[in-house]
C-alpha cells in the first residue's frame, strides 16, 4: 500500500523551499527533505509568491492509500527576515492553523498547534538553507492552511480545545495506510488532556449512541466523554498509564455486551458473539431451550431483549452480564484502576450498571462544573 506524507512533512518542505527562494533568489519547482523515518520527500512546489522581503509557497498534502480530510490540501509557508533572536528560526501558525486553548496537548496554551516533531523538521530544513547561503540572521516561518478553518470542523480539534484550524502533526513524517494507530493516538491525546485538567475520572464511551438517554436521564453530555471507538481494552490501558485512579465506561448494549465474554476490541471484524453471550446469560437465568434458540436467531440486541422481556428474565440476565463485564474489566485494569460501567440502549434505557457507576458519573459531572 502507498504511504503518504504528514502535514508536518509538507510544512517542512514548504518552509525549506520558501527559505531557499528568499535567500537564493531563484524559483524552485521541487524540493527535497528527509523525514524522521529516513524516507526522502520530493514534493512539487505550488502557489509561489515572492515579495521584497518574503517568499510564500505551498506543498499539497499527499495521504497515500490512507486518505484523510487533509488529502490534497495546500500547506503554505511564508518565510521572511526577522530581527535577531535567541532562535535562528522563529516558527508560528497563520490562517487555518489552530491555536491551543487547553492544557495537556503537545504545545502549551496560546501556541500554534504545530507539534514538536514538525517544528523540529521545519527548523532543521530551514537552517540547512541558511547555512548554505551563509545567512547569519534569523528567519520567521509562518505556516498556514487556506482551508484549515473549514477542515478543522471535521476533526477532533474543537473537542481538544484547538481553535481556528487544523494541527500540523506527524512523528515519522510518513502517513501509514492504516487507521487504528491514528485513532489510538487521538484517544491518548484526549485522555492526557483530561488528566492534565485535573480530572480523576476518565469517562469513556464507544461513541455518541445513547446521547439522548445519558443527557435526559443523567444530565450528562456524551460529547464530554472520550470516544474510545472499539478499542475499550487499549483505552483502559492508556488510562492506567496516564494515572487515572477511576474510569467510567458507558455505552450501548450492542458493543458492551461483548465485554461479558472478555472481548476488549468490540469491532465486528474482531468478534461478533452478542447473541451467544446473551443466550448464555439467559441459560443461567433459567430460560427454556426454545427461548435460547430464539435469542441465537436474533439479528439485533434489541430483538433479543424483547424475548428476555417476554420471559420475564431481562433484569436477571443483565445482572449476570454485568457481573461478567465487571470481572473482565477488573482483570484488564489489573488492580491499578477502579472501573465502573453503565450499559443501555436508546429504546430500553438503562439495562445494567455496576455498583459504583452512578457515583463515578456524579463525580465526573462535578468536575465538569468546577
Image (cartoon, rainbow, N blue to C red):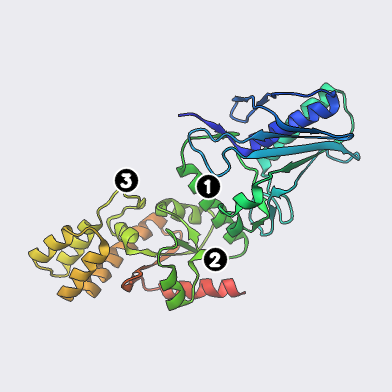
Residue at mark 3: 269
Out of 349 and 55, give the one closest to the viewer: 55
Q: Is residue 28 left or right of residue 61?
A: right
Image point (72%, 44%), residue name: 144
Q: In the picture, residue 20 is in which quadrant?
A: top right
Front disc: 3 or 2: 3
- x%, y% of residue 145? 68, 44
Q: Would you name the residue on which mark 1 appears?
A: 185
Vertical position of residue 213 compared to residue 17: above or below: below
Kindly identify the residue that appears in the image at 49 percent across and 52 percent down: 238
The residue located at (69%, 36%) in the rendering is 11
Camera sees residue 354: yes
Give the mark, 1 or 3, whose residue is nearer the N terminus: 1
Question: Looking at the picture, how far across and down is residue 128, in whole percent?
Answer: 77, 26
Question: Could you tell me how far apart the alpha carbons at marks 2 and 1 are, in whole angstroms?
Answer: 20 Å
Q: Position of residue 156 (x, y in %)?
A: 56, 54
Badge number at residue 200 = 2
Mark 2 closeness class: few <14, some 14–19, many ≥20 residues within 10 Å: some
Where residue 23 sits, quadrant-wise, is top right
* Image position of 23 (left or right of 340): right
- Residue found at the very far left of the displayed protein: 289
Q: What element carries label 3?
A: loop
Q: How far apart are marks 1 and 3 (CA)?
A: 21 Å
Residues packed near mark 3 inside 10 Å, few (<14), some (14 to 19) or many (20 plus)? few
State the SS at label 2.
loop
Amino acid at each position: 500500500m502507498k504511504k503518504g506524507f504528514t502535514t508536518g512533512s509538507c510544512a517542512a518542505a514548504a518552509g525549506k523551499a520558501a527559505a531557499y527562494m528568499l535567500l537564493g533568489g531563484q524559483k524552485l519547482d521541487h524540493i527535497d527533505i528527509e523525514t524522521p523515518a529516513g524516507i526522502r520527500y520530493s514534493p512539487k512546489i505550488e502557489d509561489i509568491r515572492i515579495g521584497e522581503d518574503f517568499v510564500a509557497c505551498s506543498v499539497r498534502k499527499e495521504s497515500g492509500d490512507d486518505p484523510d480530510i487533509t488529502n490534497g490540501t495546500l500547506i503554505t509557508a511564508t518565510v521572511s527576515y526577522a530581527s535577531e533572536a535567541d532562535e535562528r528560526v522563529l516558527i508560528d501558525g497563520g490562517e487555518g492553523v489552530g491555536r491551543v486553548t487547553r492544557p495537556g496537548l503537545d504545545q502549551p496554551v496560546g501556541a500554534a498547534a504545530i507539534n514538536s516533531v514538525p517544528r523540529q523538521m521545519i527548523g532543521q530544513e530551514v537552517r540547512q538553507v541558511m547555512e548554505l547561503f551563509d545567512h547569519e540572521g534569523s528567519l520567521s516561518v509562518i505556516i498556514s492552511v487556506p482551508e484549515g478553518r473549514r477542515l478543522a470542523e471535521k476533526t477532533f480539534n474543537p473537542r481538544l480545545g484547538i481553535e481556528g484550524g487544523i494541527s500540523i502533526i506527524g512523528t515519522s513524517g510518513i502517513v501509514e495506510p492504516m487507521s487504528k494507530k491514528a485513532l489510538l493516538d487521538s484517544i491518548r491525546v484526549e485522555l492526557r488532556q483530561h488528566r492534565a485538567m485535573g480530572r480523576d475520572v476518565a469517562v469513556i464511551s464507544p461513541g455518541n449512541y445513547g446521547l439522548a438517554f445519558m443527557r435526559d436521564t443523567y444530565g450528562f453530555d456524551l460529547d464530554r466523554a472520550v470516544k474510545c471507538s472499539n478499542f475499550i481494552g487499549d483505552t483502559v490501558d492508556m488510562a492506567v498509564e496516564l494515572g487515572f485512579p477511576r474510569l467510567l465506561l458507558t455505552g450501548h448494549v450492542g458493543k458492551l455486551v461483548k465485554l461479558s465474554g472478555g472481548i476488549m476490541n468490540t469491532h465486528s471484524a474482531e468478534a461478533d458473539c452478542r447473541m451467544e453471550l446473551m443466550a448464555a446469560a439467559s441459560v443461567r437465568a433459567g430460560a427454556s431451550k426454545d427461548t435460547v434458540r430464539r435469542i441465537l436467531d436474533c439479528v439485533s440486541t434489541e430483538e433479543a431483549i424483547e424475548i428476555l422481556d417476554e420471559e420475564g428474565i431481562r433484569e436477571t440476565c443483565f445482572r449476570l452480564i454485568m457481573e461478567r463485564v465487571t470481572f473482565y474489566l477488573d482483570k484488564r485494569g489489573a488492580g491499578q484502576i477502579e472501573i465502573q460501567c453503565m450499559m443501555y440502549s436508546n429504546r430500553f434505557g438503562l439495562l445494567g450498571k455496576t455498583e459504583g457507576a452512578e457515583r463515578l458519573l456524579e463525580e465526573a459531572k462535578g468536575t465538569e462544573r468546577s
